[in-house]
């Protein structure tokens, strides 16, 4: 079933999603700040172009960009219109937002979208949260976005559940990435493994660790077998932090996901204040620097 | 190229490998302690049945079973015969073992084998370590064992490298499993996710975490959606421990793999001595138990 | 300088603090829910008994008890009165609270109080946050509460800083406790140490780990050398969670404090959902339970 | 009771111990590689100067320096002489060493020594392992080394137990140091704490975290309040690694001690190979670098 959707945010994610939706026969009216890609020049124009009851799907950075857009849309949309937040919004904000929109007669659902730039071709993983009727209304869009075999979709629960499970998905992703990263470093540090890239490549078949992340790692090592062109520096999106926050809130031990997050924090520090404290304490044991060259014992113990 | 191999150990792994090797046209002479499956009744008979230069592949538990078998084979085999250890031997033992066998004119190579009971059908991941000529000799066997598309094979380096990378593979596996496990617990602990099994199932397509481990988890949740039939108890094979040991030896931070190992240790403790210390200290702060009911502050800090 | 203070909350902490304040010559008017200890029967009576400008010090559980009391006091107190929150309030709530009270003409400062039941005799560590003038006004009370040598006091910063550093103090405490706990378990698990309690006792002198927590541990082991009377079960106060939350918010890697918190979470789980997932995955590798008895390899790998 | 001892190794530890032993009335014959401090110029001369049955106490770096000296002493000493290894030897080496020396009629005991450069004045913590009679023989030396109040001494068990508990002591020390370090970094990273050094200083009295390590940290911050003169770089002695190894061997979860060790490993890496893998994978999600500037979503998930 073909339908019409307003898509706000035409970046790497939104732009590709618009293309996939169109490929599957949907009508997409796109709006973005950058003039070159968009179909309409403003949110009012977007709303005008859509036939009520409207569906508007947001693919914006979480936080202010999403919040400000929803605020503006609230005053433009009509009773019965549906806003879908496909960005990485913190799940704790969803329920509040849904309640506010309901007061204006607007429906709201959240959608976690996974797949990166590969999604246009492969399809996206789509995890939605919301009321049954809203989710049903958006279903044709989701069907177009997921992989062609029809997998990759879940209605995880009420409002917020889509963002919650997408958040957990990303937390798991952090842990998996870090597991591969530690394995890489250990093989590279040993003098026993002659072919680290070949080892990863071989693991793509028959092994327990075969996975899409492994495929991506093999791809990266094909281009740069010793990763000499990269710095060991990694940003974190909010979702790793939120996963740890949710784990702490629910008294769930999450040592692996947390360690993966902390490794990213540490990767961005040119110097570690904590480790300065360790150095300072070690100096204090030894009395002064000369101790260092003299005996391991003098330094620790 | 079809060849002959003696296979010692016909358990879950060895038995399936024998079957796959035979399916691919190799001649397998199998020996195991249990009479029903074996082709020969003793190691001397095995050696007698094989044509020199012989190839004997061991699929035995690491430690004594493997060591004892190699010791007995050393006295039975002839110069130029090749022993392949396909078990999960600690890589640090391989070089010593190879040197000893070389003194007896015997060749040695190590093979890490991944794939579990699924390997018979899907093929195994095979990671070998050893000299070029020995590895070349065993290649037809490896070609039969790996998946039909020819992937899943690496000659990772000299003697020990096969077991080393298999060890790291398992360390990564620990980390990945724990990442999924933490994500499961967090979703189950929240009151926001109505369909945890469905969420995992949806992740098999389009997402970043899609992987064989995810496939297995979905399979397990199909049978038992809330895992009510299982206890949260997990053994660890030696390889997780060895990975942490190797990380420490090489000064490689491996927080994720280590956390996964420690979670298994903890899962097997009916009560934690360490946490008794925490409880004891908390009692000391508060003076006596009555403090607990009175105020959070009295207990801590 | 002797002064008058209203003290709300006469539990293990508040009650002892009242006693210490009186010992040092201050006039304490105490209120608590329980009739036996209190000097006044209600907050209105408390306010009536105090001479303006009043100082009211709260020692209540954080969250609702503190919030509700402050709300009631807001309507009872007069311009220029000062509320001191000595409980373990989350620092993020302090600024908001101070701003609200300021609108009613009331001053607010926060005080982290450390020392447990030992504080009455030894004195307390007092960490305050607030405006210079408010902090100065409360100083005589703080001087009475801290140890007799005058140490143990810091004005850490503006409103919220007292609770923030008390929170960090408790986070550090978690890490230190867990370090001792792990050391205990390792010594107890080895067959090499014949005298674990004696070892801890010896460490009280001359070593690097000598500390008050060690003193408490030695005291606990004096009573129960193998801690047989305790379960390895530990609650966590909010402050460990808040420390981890603050670390995540500030992108500060805090692996030790977090590991200590997670160990407490795990100690309270009769069975671990996460480890059920590990068990389920291990079952999947092996195909079925028979695999377990057969070979380590079949289970992992 | 005054006695005679040969002391080999007159570095920061050995030199101060010699001085303390002499202060307490013992006769110390010292040998070291560096001519200026020593009483004798060679091990043979040392042995000649001592009256049989001799006691020789080693304070040398663990590994080859200790092993080589013991080997040389084995050929020089006579039946009934006692070697005490006061260095940080790995406990697993002690039993083998004791057995070898016993074959030569020599007694052996191990002594863990804690206290750093402060030990000369304050006394040392001494943890010994060995047979009752050997330990008794060395007791007067230990009595002189421990603090004047007589605490700080334990006979922890048979040969190896002294080094084992010293190892665990250092593991605990790692964890405690890291706890303070994380607390420091968090306070420094927040914009809420105006007086970090003052906060630590205040904690020396009345609080739960008061400890010698805190005293040392306050001393370090007195000299350099923001630790600007230090890099966040920390070596690790073998003992942290051995503690983690022992924990893994005994299936004891030791997340805090391990995290502290890994933080040191990471502190010494100019760039992290593991985090290059994370960066590489993030690049792969996003397709290319342009994605980074466009949307957080494109990069992760």
Image: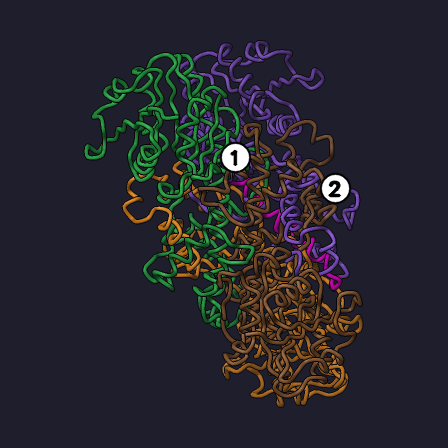
Chain colours: A purple, B orange, C green, D brown
Estimate the spatial distance between the alpha carbons at disc 1 and disc 2, rounded to whole Å: 27 Å
Q: Which label belongs to residue C246?
A: 1
Residues in magenta? Answer: A168-193
- The quadrant of the image that shows the N terminus of chain C is top left
Magenta stretch: includes residue C280: no
Left or right: D141, with B92 as reference point: left
Residue, x 73% and y 80% (percent of image)?
A: D72
Tag 1: Cα neighbours inside 10 Å, few (<14), some, or many (≥20)? many
Query: Tags 1 and 2 in contact by the CB under 8 Å rule?
Result: no
Q: Which label belongs to residue A231?
A: 2
Closest to the observer: D178 or A242?
A: D178
Which of discs 1 and 2 lies nearer the camera? The answer is 1
Closest to the observer: A211 or D116?
A: D116
Horizontal and vertical percent position of residue C114? 42, 39
Q: Could you say whether the residue bearing mark 1 is in a helix, strand or loop?
A: helix
Q: Quadrant of residue A60?
A: top right
Q: Quadrant of residue D119?
A: bottom right
Tag 2: Cα neighbours inside 10 Å, few (<14), some, or many (≥20)? some
């Amino acid at each position: 079933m073909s339908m019409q959707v307003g898509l706000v945010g035409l970046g790497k994610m939104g732009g590709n999603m618009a293309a996939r939706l169109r490929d599957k026969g949907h009508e997409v009216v796109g709006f973005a700040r950058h003039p070159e890609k968009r179909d309409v020049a403003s949110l009012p124009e977007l709303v005008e172009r859509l036939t009520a009851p409207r569906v508007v799907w947001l693919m914006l950075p979480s936080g202010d960009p999403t919040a400000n857009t929803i605020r503006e849309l609230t005053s433009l949309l009509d009773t019965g219109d549906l806003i879908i937040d496909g960005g990485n919004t913190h799940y704790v904000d969803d329920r509040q937002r849904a309640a506010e929109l309901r007061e204006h007669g607007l429906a709201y659902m959240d959608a976690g979208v996974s797949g990166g730039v590969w999604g246009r071709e492969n399809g996206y993983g789509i995890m939605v949260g919301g009321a049954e009727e809203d989710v049903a209304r958006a279903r044709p869009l989701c069907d177009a976005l997921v992989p062609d075999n029809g997998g990759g979709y879940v209605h995880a629960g009420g409002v917020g559940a889509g963002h919650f499970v997408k958040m957990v998905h990303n937390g798991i992703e952090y842990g998996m990435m870090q597991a591969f990263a530690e394995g890489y470093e250990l093989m590279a540090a040993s003098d026993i493994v002659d072919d680290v890239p070949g080892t990863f490549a071989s693991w793509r078949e028959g092994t327990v660790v075969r996975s899409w992340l492994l495929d991506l790692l093999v791809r990266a090592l094909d281009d740069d077998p010793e990763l000499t062109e990269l710095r060991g520096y990694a940003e974190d999106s909010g979702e790793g932090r939120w996963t740890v926050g949710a784990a702490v809130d629910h008294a769930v031990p999450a040592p692996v996901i947390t360690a993966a997050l902390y490794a990213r924090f540490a990767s961005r520090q040119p110097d570690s204040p904590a480790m300065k404290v360790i150095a300072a304490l070690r100096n204090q044991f030894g009395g002064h620097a000369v101790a260092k060259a003299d005996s391991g014992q003098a330094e620790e113990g």
